[in-house]
Image (cartoon, helix red, strand yellow):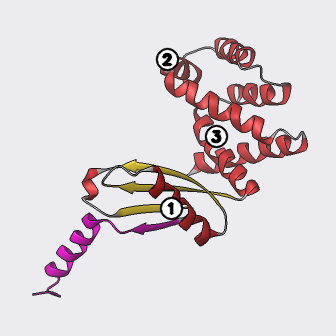
């Protein structure tokens, strides 16, 4: 909980600077790219987060990342601050919080749909249209396949969840039998 609050504070501060300098999308791209890079290179991430690794070594790593990604001075200062304050381990949460701020700013809602079978492009487009109509906002849709739900759909749209999976219906039916409501 504390890390989420902290991540949101850092994200809001960076977002304010990005808005002022008209670099909202650029900073989001940098954050998301750095987050992906660190997840893919766990040894570098571990070094940045380790209390054993000296601050100077962490600063050298960050300077190399700044050069490699051609990061401007404001964003570079932000990354240096994360290292100095020993907050690099919050980068993923900061990137997520920044993305939420970007979505809010641009009127986008993220939707995650889980189905038991592979969904074609046409059905994916129909789902996106239905969610857009329901929310009145643009939808960025992510569809995942999970055969364990047996059938149906589970949809997470913004802060709402619709669970129309056969698995949850069977569990509800089982609970009803256990309470003696059916039988």
- Does dot 2 land on a helix, a strand or a loop? helix
Is the C-beta separation of discs 1 and 3 under 8 Å?
no
Q: Is residue 88 visible?
A: no
Q: Is residue 163 magenta?
A: yes
Q: Which residue is mark 1?
A: 126
Q: Which residue is mark 3?
A: 95
Q: Is residue 106 magenta?
A: no
Q: Report the side of 19 relative to 1 (left or right).
A: right
Q: Report the side of 146 relative to 20 (left or right).
A: left
Q: Is residue 125 visible?
A: yes
Q: Which of the 4 image quarters holds residue 29?
A: top right
**Which of marks 2 and 3 precedes in the sequence?**
2
Q: Position of residue 138 (x, y in %)?
A: 66, 59
Task: Please give the range of residues in magenta.
Answer: 160-183
Using the image, determine if residue 171 lies above or below residue 9: below
**Which of marks 3 and 1 precedes in the sequence?**
3
Instruction: Write the residue at 59% across / 42% down.
Output: 93
Query: For residue 43, which numbered disc appears in the image?
Result: 2
- Does dot 1 land on a helix, a strand or a loop? helix
Closer to viewer: mark 2 or mark 1: 1
How many circles with numbers are drawn on the protein?
3
Q: Residue furthest left?
A: 183
Instruction: Write the residue at 79% across / 30% down.
Output: 75
**Which of marks 1 and 2 precedes in the sequence?**
2
């Amino acid at each position: 909980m504390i890390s989420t609050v902290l991540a949101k504070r850092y994200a809001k501060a960076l977002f304010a600077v990005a808005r002022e300098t008209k670099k909202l999308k650029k900073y989001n791209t940098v954050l998301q790219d750095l987050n992906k890079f660190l997840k893919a290179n766990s040894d570098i991430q571990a070094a940045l987060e380790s209390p054993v690794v000296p601050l100077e070594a962490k600063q050298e790593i960050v300077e190399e990342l700044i050069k490699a990604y051609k990061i401007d001075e404001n964003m570079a200062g932000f990354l240096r601050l994360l290292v100095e304050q020993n907050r690099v381990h919050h980068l993923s949460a900061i990137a997520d919080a920044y993305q939420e701020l970007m979505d809010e700013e641009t009127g986008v809602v993220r939707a995650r749909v889980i189905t038991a079978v592979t969904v074609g492009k046409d059905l994916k487009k129909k789902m996106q249209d239905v969610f857009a109509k329901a929310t009145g906002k643009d939808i960025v849709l992510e569809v995942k396949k999970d055969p364990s739900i047996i059938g149906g759909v589970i949809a997470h749209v913004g802060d709402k969840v619709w669970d129309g999976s056969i698995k949850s219906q069977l569990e509800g039916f089982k609970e009803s039998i256990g309470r003696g409501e059916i039988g």
